[in-house]
Image (tube, grey):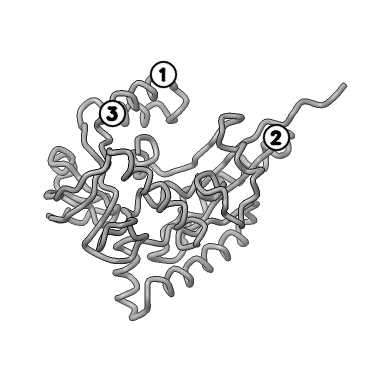
Amino acid sequence: MSSPTPTPYYITTPIYYVNDQPHIGHCYTTIVADAVARFMRLAGHDVFFLTGTDEHGQKVEKSAAARGISPQQLADENARHFVTALGYVGATNDDFIRTTQPRHERQVQKVLTTLIDSGDFYLDTFEGWYDEGQEEYVTENQARERDFKAFNGRPLVKATEENYFFRLTKYWDRVREWIEAHPDFVQPDARRNEVLGRLKDDPRDVPISRTNFSWGIPVPGRENHVTYVWIDALLNYMTALGLVDESVAEVDASRVHYWNGSGPVVHFIGKEILWFHAVI
């Protein structure tokens, strides 16, 4: 009797921000994800375990400037620290994605071109509250609920910025209905209910570019616009597998089946980045 075909499991950590060195929280998340990856391998499943670093954005640019070095130098330095930390905890990751790698940047620009061509892409000016720690735009209602404070306890900042936006509101109901129909998509239930509550009360489009700083992936054909760090970062789960650009030489074509519905995709994340992962 032939043995059953192993189920593919795609297991990921969030990619870690390089504005500073690793801390115990990064290690905790990595160890949990690694334990699941090891267990699934022992159970005979086909596992691909991904981690990496998120290397663009305003915080990286500011942190580098404070030290008198370039953002790329800071990213290189702290990416090495994260790789060292993975060794300390014995992580068995199959790849380490960096968002400054050409394989990632090229695929992000291809996605942006697709969004531009779709017609769901428009220029507008954001005016409102901004959480510098999370690099997140905050609605007036959210700002009031948080007592006008960021996740890290610091005051929210009033901001005005020209951005390109994606018409997420066009797909808002479809996203909500999909999450309602798939109760295991967000766990635990309390966090799932949190996302659904926000989807019922807070329809808005999502920015996909920034203009108040320069450290990011350029938006194709849009001078002075760089990719919003959350759009850039979330695409890592696809770019590491080479799903967007089949010409990526570093990626084996055999990775595609980890994303095409053949098996579970399991993202281990913190609650503060749930909205981006669940909706955007």
Q: Residue at the bottom extreme?
A: 68
Q: Residue at x 23, y 38 (%)?
A: 205
CA gap between label 2 and label 3 equals 35 Å
Position of 54 with respect to 168 (left or right) is right
Look at discs 1 and 3 and give the one toward the viewer. 3
Whole-percent x and y of residue 194? Answer: 31, 30
- Mark before the other along the chain sequence, 2 or 3: 2
Q: Residue at x 12, y 50 (%)?
A: 127
Position of 81 with respect to 110 (left or right) is right
Position of 155 with respect to 2 (left or right) is left
Look at discs 2 and 3 and give the one toward the viewer. 3
Position of 196 with respect to 260 (left or right) is left
- Mark before the other along the chain sequence, 2 or 1: 2
The amino acid marked with disc number 2 is: His
Circle 2 residue:
45
The amino acid marked with disc number 3 is: Trp
Q: Quadrant of residue 186?
A: top left
Circle 1 residue:
181
Secondary structure, mark 2, is loop
Image quadrant holding the C terminus, namely top left
For label 2, the crowd category at 10 Å Cα-Cα, with few meaning under 14, some 14 to 19 and many 20 or more, is some
Whole-percent x and y of residue 220? Answer: 34, 56
Secondary structure, mark 3, is helix
CA gap between label 1 and label 3 equals 14 Å
Q: Is residue 268 above or below residue 200?
A: below
Circle 3 residue:
172
Q: Residue at x 52, y 49 (%)?
A: 245
Q: Residue at x 31, y 45 (%)?
A: 116
CA gap between label 2 and label 1 equals 27 Å
